[in-house]
Amino acid sequence: MLTGIVKAVCISEKKGTEKHNVGHVHVRPNHGIDGDAHAGSWHRQISLLSYDKVKAFNERGAGVGHGAFGENLVVEGIDFKSLPVGSRFAVGSAELEMTQIGKECHSHCAIYKRMGECIMPHEGVFAEVVKEGDIWEGDELTVIPPDPARPFTAAVITLSDKGAKGEREDKSGPAAVRILEKAGYEVEEALILPDEPEILKTQLKRLADGRQIDLVVTSGGTGFSMRDRTPEATMAVADRNAPGIAEYIRYRSMEVTNRAVLSRGVSVIRGRTLIVNLPGSPKAVEESLDFILEPLAHGLGILRGSVSECGRGQEKK
């Protein structure tokens, strides 16, 4: 078991103020740290940072104290960035689950302005509370690897200029969420974005790299309109192509309407995340997911490493 020692337990009572070491906190599920301004029912309830990373940064002249990066727990002996999302941390009488690696820095902090960089956006991780308890400075933190049999996670993105402005009700996204949840997926996020490729690329990178979502499905932006750029944005963030999924959706959709030949949707892999473009209509979303959900589970298991990849009819030796 990988273990570390809690060197500081930090909170900030008001947003926009620097965190400070309080030595002890009480944590609760669906909330986070009692007394911390960033507590709430969301996936970034508690932030963690390696003491060893902070020490190395300070040796270069940063001179920052505990909590300066906005971290709640400073832990010696663990490189959090190297752990997969889904890892659990038994610490004190509480238990946490890692939900995200790093975060986007929207406005550079004083540390960045002084040093030219800040380690929290790429070294820090976030977690939510899964078991209520107390955490003290000096507690041992034990890393529990993710359960390989845990449900697959998913995120749904609807691409619609009018939907993003609130001028049109999104029916495709909720349809995808409903189908995925019924199939046993844990849908972590559902977003409505305008048809802007740069915005979509940013969100796909965040969901794949930071949140390590197993499956991201997009709806809309796959046609011939000049604003339809979903496939191009998706290909731009891809590590590998997975064309069979999109090809099969088009093939099966041709049984319903010959206009399916006009769909430009793609399917790709980024890291261990599968990204699949779906058409924009609720009916087409439902049909497309129905076509692919059964074989998808095997592919996602291979990406996660929980199942082996073997050819059909392969004999055991």
Image (spheres, rainbow, N blue to C red):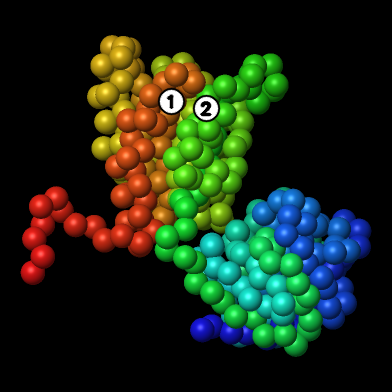
The residue that label 1 is drawn on is: 286
Residue beneath the point at 57% across and 22% down: 171
Q: Earlier in the sequence, mark 2 or mark 1?
A: 2
Q: Nearer the viewer, residue 233 or 158?
A: 158
**Image side of residue 285 versus residue 97, left or right:** left
Residue beneath the point at 43% across and 25% down: 286
The residue that label 2 is drawn on is: 175
Residue beneath the point at 49% across and 66% down: 146
Q: Are marks 2 and 1 in contact (CB under 8 Å)?
A: yes
**Image side of residue 89 versus residue 310, left or right:** right
Q: Position of residue 51 (x, y in %)?
A: 68, 81
**Image side of residue 302 versus residue 315, left or right:** right
Q: Position of residue 268 (x, y in %)?
A: 37, 43
Q: Is residue 105 visible?
A: no
Q: Amino acid at mark 2?
A: Ala
Label 2 environment density (alpha carbons within 10 Å; few <14, some 14–19, many ≥20): some
Q: Position of residue 193 (x, y in %)?
A: 61, 31
Q: Amino acid at mark 1?
A: Glu
Q: Considering only vertical position in the picture, is 50 above or below 241? A: below
Q: In which quadrant of the rendered view does residue 117 lie? A: bottom right
Q: CA distance from mark 2 to mark 1?
A: 7 Å
Q: Position of residue 98 (x, y in %)?
A: 60, 64
Q: In which quadrant of the rendered view does residue 308 lie? A: bottom left
